């Protein structure tokens, strides 16, 4: 038996696939930005003096990291909606991705903040910087430089994870692939094209990260 | 027609969790074997082998697990293979596991100082003796904690097999929701079951990391 590849179906439907790529990008970038804010707050809670805040943050991180994203997504989309506030599928997708990424970002950022030695903070104080400036310039910026590779890796994983939101019919790349498959039955061609698009997205994220690194962290050359 | 009590739901979910555990176990063992082979290629002294194996690992790590499941289920029909959901799920998860484990293990091997290789060569060991007698025993120690930690990732990954119709924990949760209209309770219990499986593994991995640290 020989199989004839027909990649024509990809060229015929590329606007649909690009639409999917666009939503994947929007969801990933949106969840990255929001999740980093959640992670910032979470990391501050994890290292705070208050026991309650510390345990709350720990419970959040462990609960998210030890359950599958699919179940978190279904819980948010169907479970929460059944109680009252009804969420659209794209909103639920963004919310679930943010909550998921926030937990990983919390852990990474905590590690980053803990990587700053107390001597640095004392040096900041002796220069007469106020608390906010010390946090921003002495703690946060070098901390982010330290955890940058880990953070980028996690953001790429987030982008790949966003494929799961196709399960609640958010029309991103994987959903579009599934949709085209059910209409054309060109399973292999479509999913390999989708896989290639994901690899290109991964490369795009990594490349952007490298370019940003050069601009943002020039000071690390003097550390 | 009878109603499902909360106890019925709980028991049904716990019973479905056996497929999650079975799939994770099989994929982890097969993926471990394949991952070991891939790791050997990735540290091989021959450049083409290194590049080829790295390419395979990058492709697997650069695509979503869900797409790998879909390709293994729908895509393989071009080879004339009509795989059942469980077979495609095992295949996809094995490939995924092997790529990540090969990366973890390659990292452990490369963290062994070059001096150890040189010392082994000075004992006139051949390549496989250097690797098997000197490098791997030390690398295994460093790789145990991340390997155990990755098992939790595999268990979470099995939930995506639900997308190709393999009825494990997440899929039964959806099935039960469709009958009982209790999504909040059902998905909450499902999450708790996953947590009860994964949390001890992650905690154990972290303890290993501390106790095996140099």
Image (cartoon, coloured by chain):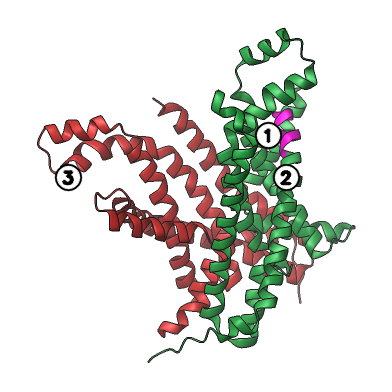
* Secondary element at tag 2: helix
The residue drawn where x is 55% and y is 56% is: A203
Q: CA distance from mark 3 to mark 2?
A: 47 Å
Chain letter belonging to callout 3: B
- The image position of residue A16, as x and y in percent, is 69, 76
The residue drawn where x is 66% and y is 46% is: A64
Residue A191 against residue A12 in the figure, above or below: above
Residue beneath label 1, please? A58
The residue drawn where x is 24% and y is 49% is: B45
* Secondary element at tag 3: helix
Compared across the picture, whether B149 is left or right of A111 comes to: left
Which residue in the rendered view is the most extreme toward the left? Answer: B124
Which residue in the rendered view is the most extreme toward the top? Answer: A126
Q: Residues within 10 Å of mark 3 (few under 14, many from 20)?
A: some
- The image position of residue A199, as x and y in percent, is 54, 62
- 1 or 2: tag closer to the N-terminus: 2
Which residue in the rendered view is the most extreme toward the bottom? Answer: A1
Q: Which residues are magenta?
A: A39-47
In the picture, the disc for residue B213 is none
Chain appearing in green on the rendered image: A
Q: Are marks 3 and 1 in contact (CB under 8 Å)?
A: no
> Main SS of the magenta segment?
helix
Q: CA distance from mark 3 to mark 1?
A: 46 Å
- The image position of residue B167, as x and y in percent, is 58, 69
Chain letter belonging to callout 1: A
Which is in the foreground here, disc 1 or disc 2? Answer: 2
Compared across the picture, whether B113 is left or right of B54 comes to: left
Residue beneath label 2, please? A35
In the picture, the disc for residue B127 is 3
Q: Are marks 3 and 1 on the same chain?
A: no
Q: Colour of chain B?
A: red
The N terminus of chain A appears in which quarter of the rendering? bottom left
């Amino acid at each position: 038996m020989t199989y004839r590849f027909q990649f024509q179906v990809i060229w015929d439907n590329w606007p649909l696939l690009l639409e999917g790529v666009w939503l994947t990008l929007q969801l990933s970038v949106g969840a990255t930005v929001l999740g980093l804010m959640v992670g910032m707050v979470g990391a501050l809670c994890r290292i705070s003096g208050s026991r309650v805040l510390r345990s709350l943050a720990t419970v959040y991180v462990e609960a998210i990291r030890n359950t599958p994203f699919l179940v978190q997504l279904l819980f948010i989309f169907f479970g929460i909606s059944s109680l009252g506030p009804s969420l659209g599928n794209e909103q639920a997708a963004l919310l679930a991705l943010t909550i998921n990424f926030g937990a990983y970002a919390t852990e990474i950022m905590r590690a980053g903040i803990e990587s700053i030695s107390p001597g640095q903070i004392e040096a900041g104080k002796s220069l007469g910087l106020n608390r906010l400036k010390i946090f921003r310039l002495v703690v946060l910026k070098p901390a982010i430089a330290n955890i940058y590779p880990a953070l980028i890796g996690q953001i790429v994983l987030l982008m790949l994870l966003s494929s799961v939101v196709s399960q609640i019919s958010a029309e991103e790349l994987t959903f579009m692939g599934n949709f085209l498959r059910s209409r054309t039955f060109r399973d292999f061609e479509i999913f390999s094209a989708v896989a290639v698009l994901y690899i290109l997205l991964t490369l795009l994220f990594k490349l952007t990260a490298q370019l940003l690194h050069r601009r943002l962290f020039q000071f690390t050359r003097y550390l | 027609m009878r109603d499902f009590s909360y106890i019925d739901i709980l028991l049904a979910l716990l019973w479905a969790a056996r497929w999650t555990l079975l799939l994770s176990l099989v994929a982890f063992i097969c993926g471990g074997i394949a991952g070991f082979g891939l790791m050997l290629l990735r540290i091989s002294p021959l450049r083409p082998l290194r590049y080829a194996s790295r390419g395979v690992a990058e492709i697997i790590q650069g695509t979503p697990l869900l797409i790998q499941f879909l390709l293994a289920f729908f895509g393989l029909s071009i080879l004339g293979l009509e795989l059942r959901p469980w077979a495609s799920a095992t295949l996809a998860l094995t490939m995924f596991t092997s790529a990540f484990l090969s990366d973890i293990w390659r990292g452990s091997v490369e963290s062994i100082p070059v001096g150890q290789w040189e010392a082994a060569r000075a004992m006139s060991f051949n390549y496989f003796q250097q690797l098997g007698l000197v490098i791997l025993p030390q690398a295994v120690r460093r790789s145990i904690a991340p390997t155990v930690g990755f098992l939790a990732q595999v268990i979470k990954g099995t939930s995506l097999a639900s997308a190709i119709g393999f009825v494990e924990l997440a899929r039964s949760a959806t099935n039960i929701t469709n009958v009982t209209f209790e999504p909040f309770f059902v998905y909450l219990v499902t999450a708790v079951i996953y947590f009860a499986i994964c949390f001890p593994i992650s905690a154990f991995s972290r303890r290993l990391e501390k106790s095996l640290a140099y």
